[in-house]
Image: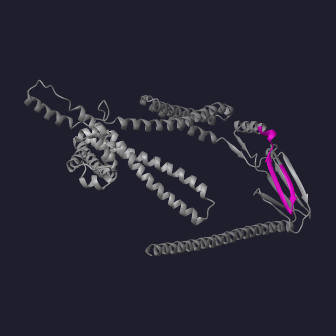
Amino acid sequence: MKLSENLRRIRKENHLSQEQLAEKLGVSRQAVSKWESGQSYPEMDKVLLICKLFDYKMDELMNENVKEVEEIRQSKNNINQYIDEFFDKVTKIVSMLSSMNWRQRLGCLMEQIMVGIVLSCILAILGGIGHSILIGVIHNFPVGVSSFIENILGSIYLILAFVVGITVFLHIFKIRYLDYYEIVKEEKTEDADVSEEPEKLEIEKVLLEKKKEKIVIRDPQHSQSRFLTEMMKVILWGIKFVAFWFACIFAFSLIGFVMLFILSFLFVGTGQVFWGSLCGILGAIVINVVILELFYDFIASRKPKKSRMAISVLAGLVLIGCSIGMILIGLTGFHYEENAEVSYEKEAVFETAMTENLSINRWFREVEFVETDSADVRVVVKHSKYYVADISEENETIFIHYWQDESKIMDAIRENIEDINHRVIKNYYVPSICVYASKENIEKMIQNERNKKEQEEQMESIKLQEAMNEMEIQLLELEQEIDEKDLQIETLTEQVEQFEQERMLEREM
């Protein structure tokens, strides 16, 4: 039945009717119908004619399935076609490179390097995003399982990224160079005027061949660096975007310098310090404006006015230098009043009986102890009217709290400005703390303070040791879990090996 089935399949694959096939073979339609139905067989000369017409061997036609024969033949043809295409591409690349000059080769190399860098960055970013998502999914898994999954998926991604990257890279190279090179070959081999003499035609053809082999077209205008130029434009726009944000920072700094320039008139009374500050701020404004103009010229692709900018920067530096000198000279006329009486216009007083473990929590390091004959302890805190002080006792420890009065902030600022204009700097912030007690009680409070510090250090050391012990216990538990997982994996591996051995024995039997 092989012959009848093969005849029917051959006829249908070649889109022939029984009448058309009968006409090609020189027989009647009924004869072809009987051959396909298996009622009769064709004569030997007809079999040979069928083999010749449709390119089959007699053994293939009589004994084998022509569908399988055609598939095998097509597979061989595809493999041969792929090999031929590969070597054809290699030949075209070599021919293209040989027809380039050194500038064209260098441009091609730089372009491929940039394409490779861009593809690597894209694949690396995608890999980083995928790794972050994967970590978020498997972070609750056991350590061994999560690391196994991470390694497997990481290896798979590396292989896929390599294959995809190479494929995209080669495709870009093909459409950027080989395709255009083929276009040039086709464009430069147009038919010449047939009316010319054959010898002249042949000479012109040879000259045309030599000329066209030196052209590697990149786009319709024969621009070799169009793609590279467009890529550089994208990079330049990215740099301009970053420059815009830096320009915004200098714009805000310009606003700040202008505000300082206006506020500096509050300190007119400082004399040289005021004029020095004014010069320094003006110099900073000039330099800031020049930097902003540079950013604007770069973003707007405008040619900078270098001479004017250089003069402006030099003038700004001169102003800043004069400013520093004038301020230093002016500061020599200032004087600092430490612990001035006017600074301590208020005081808070606290009295308590001396106890066995009484001490002072020194949030303020400067505490003055004054010896008296009293058996009690008296704490006095002198402070500015712009601050509030509170003294309390808790667990045999005296606490001193000190903070700024928010309702008097503006009064404090006005007084500061007035004092600075009079070239005076006063201490408004650090309070004066005095502890009045007998000599024995003072020594006892100091010793109690040391003992409490030692106890606190011991407690912190104990807590740290407890935390380390807990971490060691957790580490031991994790090691035990890992050992258990390893035993489970070994058991499963042994079971799988045993199962495979049993299957091999079954197959052999």
* 29 left or right of 386 in image: left
* 284 left or right of 113 in image: right
Q: Is residue 176 above or below residue 308?
A: below
Residue depicted at x 82% and y 43%: 385
Q: Is residue 374 above or below residue 212?
A: below
Give whichever of 168, 84 is nearer the camera: 84
Q: Quadrant of the C terminus?
A: bottom left
* 145 left or right of 473 in image: left
**Residue 138, image x and y in percent?**
60, 58
Residue depicted at x 60% and y 55%: 137
* 492 left or right of 44 in image: right
Q: Magenta stretch: dominant SS?
A: strand
Read off the magenta span: 389-409
Q: Is residue 89 above or below residue 224?
A: below
**Residue 16, image x and y in percent?**
31, 39
Give whichever of 90, 102 is nearer the camera: 90
When asked about the image quadrant of residue 379, the answer is bottom right
**Residue 449, image x and y in percent?**
80, 66
Residue 100 seen in render:
no
